[in-house]
Amino acid sequence: MTLQAARAATPQTPILLRENVGSICVLTLNRPSARNSLSEGMIAELHTALKDVHDDANVRALVIAANGSAFSAGHDMKELTARRIDPDHGRAYFAEIMTACSAMMQAIVQLPKPVVAAVQGIATAAGCQLVASCDLAVASEAAAFATPGVDIGLFCSTPMVALSRNVPRKQAMEMLLTGEPVPATTALNIGLINRVVPAGTEREAAIALAQKVALKSAYTIKLGKAAFYRQAEMSLADAYRYAAEVMTENMMARDAEEGIGAFIEKREPKWQDK
């Protein structure tokens, strides 16, 4: 057997793992030797998986976790640098990768189901962006977060978009301008993550948090998540007008009628997700 044939016959290790824990889908970044960097392949795999979860009625929430010591070190710099030999010195490829990564991050926000990050280690640059793009985040006490692009002459402009929508401006600017890592406790205090848990328990804690949300009406969660992100970009008056419209629509839903009735009658609601 030739070397080429041997390689073809050897199954490649999946770079993204998927498993279901009840109604919770768990996606696990699986490039530990590359610190789970967001390569072209990883971005594509994540985007495809997000589309699958979007259409899977059996999945009510999503957890994004990672194997190895790092959650994600951001973009694959070796992969990007290799394209500097292109006739345009990589410009078209860089634009393609940044656009693809931005679309994947937006797909997390646009997913009509809650997404929880389970962060076991360092999350830097686009890895930090991935955490910030999730609706909720649980981190190990050993985790840390950074946007260190300035250290290599590359300002973390795309991670900045998600980061600045999670934490106050001064804290975001300090992370972006210094590149210094922020420990999990500080990340909790500035609002980048929701909870800090003992090392090794972050995955289970994230799943437990996702399961809490999964018990709610899927219709209500879908409506509420979309409204949350949309109103955040509006002026105060426009946000209230829009929220009032959403509230009215929500009140007309079957699950709202059932939920309010169950509350009044002191019983558990029976959701129909509509």
Image: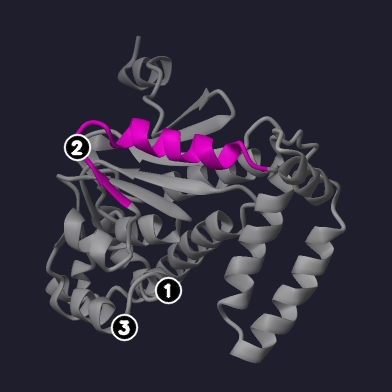
- Residue at image mark 3: 169
Q: From mark 1 to mark 3, how far is it between C-alphas?
A: 9 Å
Disc 1 residue type (three-letter)? Arg
Measured as percent of width and height from the top left, residue 143 is found at 19, 48
Disc 3 residue type (three-letter)? Arg
Q: In which quarter of the image is residue 71?
A: top left
In front: label 1 or label 2: 2
* Along the viewing direction, whichever of 246 and 86 lies nearer the viewer: 246
Residue 170, compared with residue 74, is above or below; it is: below
Q: In the image, what residue occupies the spot 74% across and 83% down?
A: 241
Q: Quadrant location of the C terminus?
A: top right
Secondary element under disc 2, as helix, strand or loop, is loop
In front: label 3 or label 2: 2
Asked if residue 183 lies left or right of residue 244, the reply is left
- Residue at image mark 2: 198
- Residue at image mark 1: 165
In primary-sequence order, the first of circles 1 and 2 is 1
Write down the region rendered in magenta: 195-216
Disc 2 residue type (three-letter)? Pro
Q: Is residue 83 magenta?
A: no
* Along the viewing direction, whichever of 146 and 136 lies nearer the viewer: 136
Q: In the image, what residue occupies the spot 54% across and 54% down?
A: 108
